[in-house]
Amino acid sequence: MRQILTPIVLLLLGAVLWQAVPFTAPADISEIGRRFVEFGVADNRAANIVTSVIVNYRGLDTLGEVSVLFLSVTGAIFVLRRREGLILATPTPSSELVATGARLLFGPILLFGAYIFAHGHLTPGGGFQGGAIVASSVLLLLLADRDRAMAHNALGWIESMSGFLYVVVGMVGIAIAGSFLSNKGILPLGLWNDLFSAGLIPVIYVLVGLKVGSELATLIDAMMHSGEKEGTQA
Amino acid sequence: MIFVDVLVCAAMIATAIAAVFQRSLISAVIMVGFISLMVSYLFVRMDAPDVAMTEAAIAAGLTTVIFLIAIRRTEDTESGDKE
């Protein structure tokens, strides 16, 4: 029954979207979009205008996004932790090839993730992408050796301190420049396309990267180890 | 290049249909991950590298792996279809 119904529902959904979404490019970018494109570099000195929009003009929305991620990860871990002693399938240990490869790749991938969020104001990418890459390096480490104990306290501290500092940086903006997460007159803007440029934007993106990375790493660890008793090695 | 785009879109649609009819959940999840990877190629083609990186890292990478962990810890076949 479901095998027949699913395609029909999907086809209907496709037909609705086909009618509803205009598949042509808009004639012109909006007023506010033009403002960002014209003044983005002058305001923030960030080579990547997308970052300028995400972290500065729409910084409050990014704080909301980070909070949404935090709440969903908290909810998922809350559900997973309650299912103690409910192991349905015992996983087999990973092969020598996977284990060695994962240990070799862990360092470079972690470094690459840090590079992505530290250079968010210069090249494509930023806190969310870099954080996800950092979390995938942790995932590789857990694939290599699934009994490896994670430093949960350290991860929790990194996660909460980076979230807290994000808000503190925003408050500094209120105190000095008069608006939340303002980038005016707090740190020197520096030269265009320099690593230490764009004022507070790299600081905020490093905080977002640390927060996203530690949250996703905690989630992966909780999923791999749900059902096991705390502190026991399965 | 437009030829490659059309090919990628056709592959995405074919994979999506195959994923719906797939009995093995692991194969279906891998297919969905492949679709995300193709979407990220299309984002690069449309000059949105930031979105493409998010799509590749989160949708093609982490989401697929989280689904795989969940499937490995439960059962690999679709149930609830016996009538």
Image: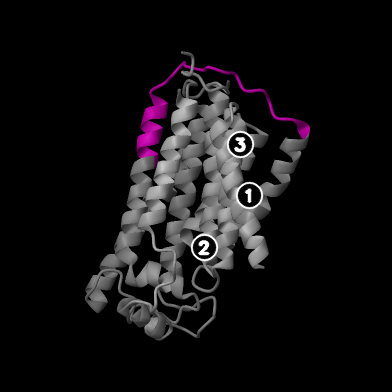
Label 1 secondary element: helix
User: Residue A90 versus residue B3: which sits nearer the camera?
Assistant: B3
Q: Look at the picture and state if B39 lies above or below B3.
A: above
Is residue A189 among what the camera can see? yes
Secondary structure type for disc 3 = helix
Magenta-span inclusion, residue A233: no
Q: Residue furthest right?
A: A97
Query: Quick one: label 3, few (<14), some, or many (20+) residues within 10 Å?
Result: many
Image marks 1 and 3: residues in contact by CB distance under 8 Å: no
List the residue tagged with mark 2: A117
Residue A224, given in percent of the width and then of the height, sits at: 54, 30
Res A27 → quadrant: bottom left
Q: Earlier in the sequence, mark 3 or mark 2?
A: 2
Horizontal and vertical percent position of residue B18: 59, 37
Part of the protein shown in magenta: A73-96
Q: Report the amino acid beneath label 3.
A: Leu
Residue wearing tag 1: B11
Chain under disc 3:
A
- The amino acid on which the numbered mark 2 sits, given as a three-letter code, is Phe
Residue at image position (48%, 44%) is A216
Q: Give me the C-alpha separation between circle 3 and circle 2.
A: 23 Å
Mark on residue A142? 3
User: Real-space Cα distance between discs 1 and 3?
Assistant: 33 Å
Front residue of A108/B32: it is B32
Query: What is the crowding at mark 1: few (fewer than 14 residues within 10 Å), some, or many (at least 20)?
Result: some
Few, some or many residues within 10 Å of mark 2 (<14, 14–19, 20+): many
Q: Is residue A190 left or right of residue B18?
A: left
Question: Looking at the rendering, which quadrant does residue A37 occupy?
Answer: bottom left
The chain carrying label 1 is B
